Amino acid sequence: MTILLSTLNARYTHASLGLRYLLANMGELKNETRIQEFVIGAKTTEMVERILAYAPKIVGFGVYIWNVEETTKLVATLKRVAPHIVIMLGGPEVSHETNEQQIVQLADYVVTGWGDVTFPKLCGEILRGPKPLMKIHAGVQPPMADIALPYSIYSDDDIAHRTLYVEASRGCPFKCEFCLSALDKTAWPFNIDTFLAEMEALHARGARVFKFVDRTFNLNIKTSLKIMQFFLDKLAADPEDPVYVHFELVPDHLPDALKEGIAKFPPGALQFEIGIQSFNPTVQANISRKQDNDKAAANIRWLCEHSHVHMHVDLIAGLPGETVESFAEGFDKLWALGPHEIQFGILKRLRGTPIIRHTEAFGLVFDPHPPYTILANRDIDFLTMQRLVRFARYWDLVANSGRFTHVTPVLLGTSPFANFMAFADWLYANTDATHRIALDRLAALTGKYLRLQGVEDVDGLLASDGHGVKQKTAPVPSVAAPQRQARHLAA
């Protein structure tokens, strides 16, 4: 074995789509190439030992915002004990502001952007000559038809135990300045028939959970309908062996033909991730986000009321021009629409994104360490931003988890943001923690807070969510959906 492809995933269940694309496109070097994935938190020396067991000549690392610090340590150690191994880097974290990064200084070569063509080419030159003269190589973007699809590389173990990431297209036509997709010129689709043939093969091998990473699934409605019909056909053929599909959806583009298809999916089969980010038109203009807020709200309401889709809708705190008050107004508006989950995100400065142009005008202050989270801005000071960070964490533990589906509406009352912020402040004051809060303790603390607010029959309310001795945990229905979504379905 000559070439090893590696990365540190956030969880074991996350299978790297990027590494599998590289392996699929290695050409004559494919038989000399292997994949070795790790999980963040693994011991550096043990990872080095496992890498050296392959005796590779080249190791390529996929570098992302969540793994760059640990990958830097891994590369540094690998270079100490095996300096003869050629280290190549790729991925979004090293594709921008490249020269100033420590991990780049440690490595031998870096591929920025698309690696499907450039990485195999560089490997061939390193192994057979002539040796590349430049350290940093801009990835060549090939025609989509020339990219070998990677889905056959998912192993049986991947299919049985891990999330299968798939994409019918790459890129995005929108220019939201907090997102790396703002640098794309458009979206590029794969041939839909070729793609669906790959999905057919995955399904035949036992795959039942498909997570689409396309930024704009509903951009081309004709293609969207064809993909949805593929999965509807699978559901119709065997309702007792369901599929679960996750798409990212543009919120203000939901024509009747798409609604008709969506309405056909049964409970537990379909999830949409919808990026609202902000309902504030001024903030939207600041970040070059084009969105019809009325249409977006109407579409979310329709999906909640007329479909069985699990709704996961995103808001981002800390955007330039967004005050706590305007964010709260947007949060309350979104809660009233009824999505199952509100993903409360905190702005991050991804390398290369245009959001940095607002630094001076809006006083943006970002953490210098990954994931480069905003610490303060002109409208939100550091201490207030910390409160928002805790709000987001507790929101995920309570509201989004599906473990407090009956408690949450009572907790929020008629002023959702203000009431949950008060709860978050109280919870932090009584725990001094945002992580490692056991579920039974969290339930007890939530009950205590509700009693302090004068809520009646708190024990019964908690029992309705399966907490306490009065009632066992409610059964989760047997569906293909991941457990958290299944809890919402059970409620």
Image (tube, helix red, strand yellow):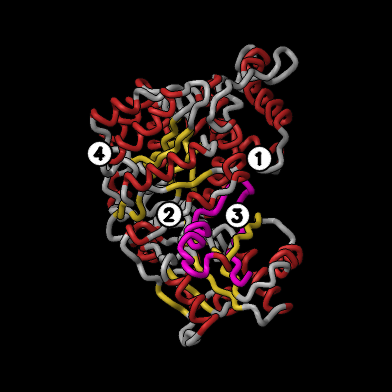
- State how far apart marks 1 and 2 are (Cα): 47 Å
- State how far apart marks 3 and 4 are (Cα): 34 Å
Q: Quadrant of residue 192?
A: top left
In the rendered structure, does residue 3 fall within the stretch colored magenta?
A: yes
> How packed is label 2: few (under 14 Cα within 10 Å), some, or many (20 or more)?
many
Left or right: 28 in relation to 35: left
Q: Badge 4 is on which residue? A: 222
Seen at 32% across and 58% down, the residue is 145
Residue 149's disc is 2
**In the image, residue 330 above or below residue 95:** above
Q: Position of residue 477 (x, y in %)?
A: 58, 20
| Residue 162 makes an appearance in the image | yes
Q: Position of residue 361 (x, y in %)?
A: 36, 63
Q: Badge 3 is on which residue? A: 9
Circle 1: residue type: Tyr
Q: Position of residue 417 (x, y in %)?
A: 48, 34
> How packed is label 1: few (under 14 Cα within 10 Å), some, or many (20 or more)?
some
In the rendered structure, does residue 108 fall within the stretch colored magenta?
A: no
